Image (spheres, rainbow, N blue to C red):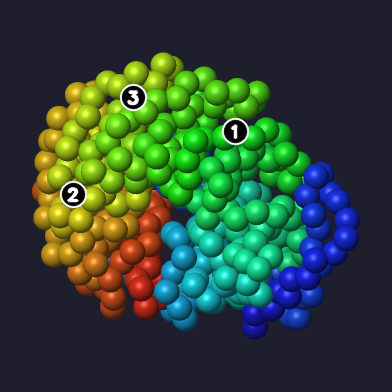
């Protein structure tokens, strides 16, 4: 049985953040199962660098291990917490499923609409709620109690690196907070709205804006290292840090790579179609889905497009990549498995509805959720 969180404001301050009161109506361990959260798929893109990649990944042919309904269309990708899979929904709740069985473990329901995909850090669930009391909440998933709370409209995906949570406000401010207390560490004005969220690598944080800027900020000090005007329209994807590059795709249909240390442009490749809101990278291959119904593979060193694999629908979900394969969903209601080197279609699997949420990947499992709210777990045969 699930439990209901009823959120009411209390007077008080904790680490610079307002506190909220929580009424738990049922079992306390609804979103908890044994096992660690760190170094798993605990946020958009899997890790703070936005690469959406793992070492390994199940090799084709795949078979369906289980399927389970979370009752509503998904909000963000499935997140992994020990032996549990946590799926956000448009019903303003998180549903916990057993990773190996798909058995429902419980749910955490909020009294307000959720603005974006949640993130995890150890036993904390980080989630942004909408108006009238828009705020970022950190909730203990073992007890259902709110640890800290910060007001603001945080519509972009969250990023967690070490003990820092990175959140972009609707006004265009990048805010770094201590994930344990909610205390503000620093803030930077980005010069535009950062709807796609931030990424972090090599001691720096990267964020793109609707005004077409890409900014690098020192993770510890909050000082701007560089800011580049890309000149190709709004930044459409969360930045991807790979090697010594930072890559984004823009609303004009271009993938742009800049030098991580200086912000100088290295190369630009035109996809010719609106990209999905996230890139993926493994080795020297960058993978991007697009509205032209194709999954594109681009050489990270040169920007040359190596391959394109056609699907029967628009790709609006962020793909994921393993050591040898790329995995993506499509609005045609299929999961596609594509060879990472050649771009050849290895196989596809029919689902019950279109796929808009990002793919989640582990060394031995692929998780994909349809717009009907059905979570599918695939593994190697």
Q: Residue 79, how many percent across, how many down?
A: 50, 58
Say which of 198 and 370 sits in front: 198
Identify which residue is drawn at 70% across, 55% down: 151
**Mark identifier at residue 273:** 2
Q: Residue 50, how many percent across, how many down?
A: 42, 41
Say which of 1 and 238 sits in front: 238
Relative placement, left or right, of 210 versus 306 is right
Q: Residues within 10 Å of mark 2 (few under 14, many from 20)?
A: some
* Residues at marks 3 and 2 touching, judged by CB atoms closer than 8 Å: no
Of the 4 image quadrants, the one containing the C terminus is bottom left
Identify which residue is drawn at 29% across, 58% down: 316
Q: Residues within 10 Å of mark 3 (few under 14, many from 20)?
A: many
Separation (CA) of disc 3 from disc 2: 21 Å
Nearer-N-terminus badge (3/2): 3
Relative placement, left or right, of 13 versus 324 is right
Q: Is residue 257 above or below residue 375?
A: above
Q: Residues within 10 Å of mark 1 (few under 14, many from 20)?
A: some
SS under mark 3: strand
Tell me the residue that label 3 is attached to.
Answer: 258
Q: Residue furthest top?
A: 262
Nearer-N-terminus badge (2/1): 1
Say which of 112 and 244 sits in front: 112
Q: Residue 193, how many percent across, how many down?
A: 48, 45
Tell me the residue that label 1 is attached to.
Answer: 188
Q: Residue 238, how many percent across, how many down?
A: 41, 43
């Amino acid at each position: 049985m699930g439990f209901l969180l009823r959120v009411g404001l209390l007077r008080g301050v904790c680490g610079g953040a307002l506190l909220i009161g929580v009424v738990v109506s049922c079992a306390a361990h609804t979103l908890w199962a044994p096992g660690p959260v760190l170094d798993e798929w605990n946020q958009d893109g899997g890790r703070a660098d936005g690469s959406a990649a793992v070492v390994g990944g199940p090799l084709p042919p795949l078979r369906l291990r289980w399927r389970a309904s979370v009752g509503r269309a998904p909000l963000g990708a499935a997140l992994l917490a020990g032996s549990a899979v946590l799926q956000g929904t448009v019903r303003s709740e998180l549903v916990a499923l057993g990773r190996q069985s798909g058995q429902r473990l419980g749910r955490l329901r909020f009294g307000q609409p959720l603005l974006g995909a949640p993130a995890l850090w150890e036993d904390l669930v980080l989630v942004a709620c909408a108006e009238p009391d828009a705020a970022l909440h950190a909730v203990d998933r073992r007890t259902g109690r709110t640890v800290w709370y910060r007001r603001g409209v945080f519509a972009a995906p969250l990023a967690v690196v070490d003990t820092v949570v990175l959140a972009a406000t609707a006004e265009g401010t990048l805010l770094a907070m201590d994930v344990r207390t909610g205390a503000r560490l620093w803030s930077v004005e980005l010069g535009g709205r950062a709807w796609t969220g931030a990424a972090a690598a090599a001691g720096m944080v990267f964020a793109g804006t609707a005004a077409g800027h890409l900014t690098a900020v020192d993770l510890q000090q909050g000082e701007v290292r560089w800011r580049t005007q890309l000149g190709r329209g709004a930044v459409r994807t969360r930045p991807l840090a790979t090697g010594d590059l930072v890559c984004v795709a823009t609303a004009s249909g271009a993938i742009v790579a800049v030098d991580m240390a200086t912000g100088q442009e290295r190369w630009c490749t035109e996809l010719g179609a609106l990209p999905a809101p996230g890139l993926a990278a493994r080795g020297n291959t960058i993978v991007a889905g697009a509205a032209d119904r194709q999954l594109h593979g681009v050489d990270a060193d040169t920007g040359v497009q190596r391959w394109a694999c056609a699907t029967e629908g628009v790709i609006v979900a962020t793909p994921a990549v393993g050591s040898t394969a790329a995995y993506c969903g499509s609005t045609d209601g299929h999961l596609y498995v594509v060879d990472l080197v050649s771009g050849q279609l290895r196989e596809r699997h029919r689902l019950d509805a279109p796929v808009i949420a990002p793919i989640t990947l582990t060394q031995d499992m692929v998780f994909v959720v349809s717009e009907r709210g059905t979570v599918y777990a695939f593994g190697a045969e």
